[in-house]
Image: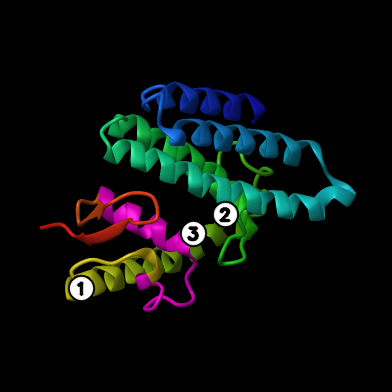
Amino acid sequence: MEDKILKLTNAVYKVLDFFPESDPLKNRAKDKALSIMEHLVLINETSGWASFQNEKIKVHILEDIDILLGYLWVGKSQGWLNSVNCLIIANEYEKIRKGIEPDPMGTPELTQKLPGMGGAPTPDKKTQEAPVAVANPVLSRAEDRQKQILEFLGRNEKAQVMDLQTILPDITKRTIRRDLDELIEAGKIVRLGDFNQIFYRVKG
């Protein structure tokens, strides 16, 4: 695990070399990548009485991943980064995110089955079948959310994440951003602007 995160952090550093030297995001992104790596190592080394502290560290990691990916998307939109490299790094951080964030369906088996994350799945047949049974509702909910997002953007010229929270009040900003990224990758919407002035609209 430590070897994987070290390689990922090195990859981020190499990609960030394409940012202009004068751009402040370059050093901020490096700091975030380093912070994520340090916190992940800390989680793996602590147990027992420190488990409560681990939960707080996990929250920091999830926030740092969101911020770092935001910086990388800015770099991609500015034309500094290769889209493929950006997507590969984002996918690796998504694996880390899924490995540490609580599963919305309350089934730890899903997390356990991720490669390199958590423990091995139990040999019990019922336990092994459980993730298959709950996978479809999760996918269905994601599709429903994305359909609502597309309908909202269809009615409005453009929108920010906070606007979309009005129609998805029980969904976190992190999840909404993830849905938006998937819709962008599918070629259905586009991202405009940068930093805290990011808007989304239906692709024309």
Which sits earlier in the primary sequence, circle 1 or circle 3? 3
From this viewpoint, is residue 148 visible?
yes
Question: What SS does tag 2 mark?
Answer: helix
Residue 165 picture location, percent across and down: 41, 73
Q: Which mark is residue 138?
A: none
- The residue that disc 3 covers is 132
- Is residue 179 in the magenta section? yes
Q: Quadrant of the N terminus?
A: top right
Instruction: Say above or below: 114 vs 7.
Output: below
Do the residues under discs 2 and 1 have CB atoms within 8 angstroms?
no
Judge left or right: residue 137 versus residue 58.
left
Q: Mark 3 and mark 2: span between their CA atoms?
A: 9 Å
Amino acid carrying label 2: it is Leu
Q: Which residue is mark 1?
A: 156
Quarter holding the C terminus is bottom left
What distance separates the C-alpha of mark 2 from that of mark 1? 37 Å
